[in-house]
Image (cartoon, helix red, strand yellow):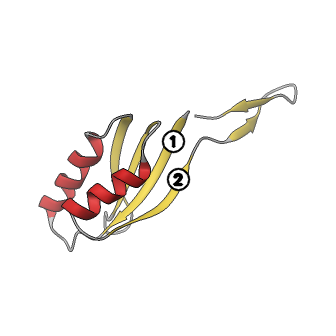
Amino acid sequence: MKQKVVISVSFNGNKNCQSKALKIAAGFSGVNSTALEGEDKNQIVVVGENIDVIELVKKLKKKVGFSTLNSCDSGGWRRKRGGRRREAY
């Protein structure tokens, strides 16, 4: 099942920390894509399958700095024609 995880990281305006955090997130098992979002580009959005979110946040805290988990979405449900439910993502 696909997951979308949003993690806030304090970069303090350092571009090296941004690229380092993206490399850490991209190297994790199950990750399909990573991106920076937010007003100050201080949020990492990770999309993938069966991501160990707790280990990812721990690793980011250890290597980059202060990190918090904002949201973890494991796919949603939407209506298909005919009233049947279908898994999103």
- First reached walking from the N terminus: tag 2 or tag 1: 1
Q: Residue 77: which disc? A: none
Q: Position of residue 2 (x, y in %)?
A: 52, 35
Relative image position of residue 46 (x, y in whole percent): 39, 46
Q: Are marks 2 and 1 in contact (CB under 8 Å)?
A: yes
Q: Which residue is located at x 46 percent, y 51 percent?
A: 5
Above or below, comparing residue 50 to residue 8 in the picture: above
Q: Decide: is 77 above or below 61.
A: above
For the N terminus, give its image quadrant.
top right
Disc 2 element? strand
- Residue at 42 percent across and 45 percent down: it is 52
Q: Residue furthest left?
A: 16
23 left or right of 31 in image: left
In this figure, which residue is indicated by the disc labeled 2?
72
Inter-mark Cα distance, 2 to 1 = 7 Å
Write down the quadrant of residue 74 in the picture: top right
- Residue occupying the far right of the picture: 82
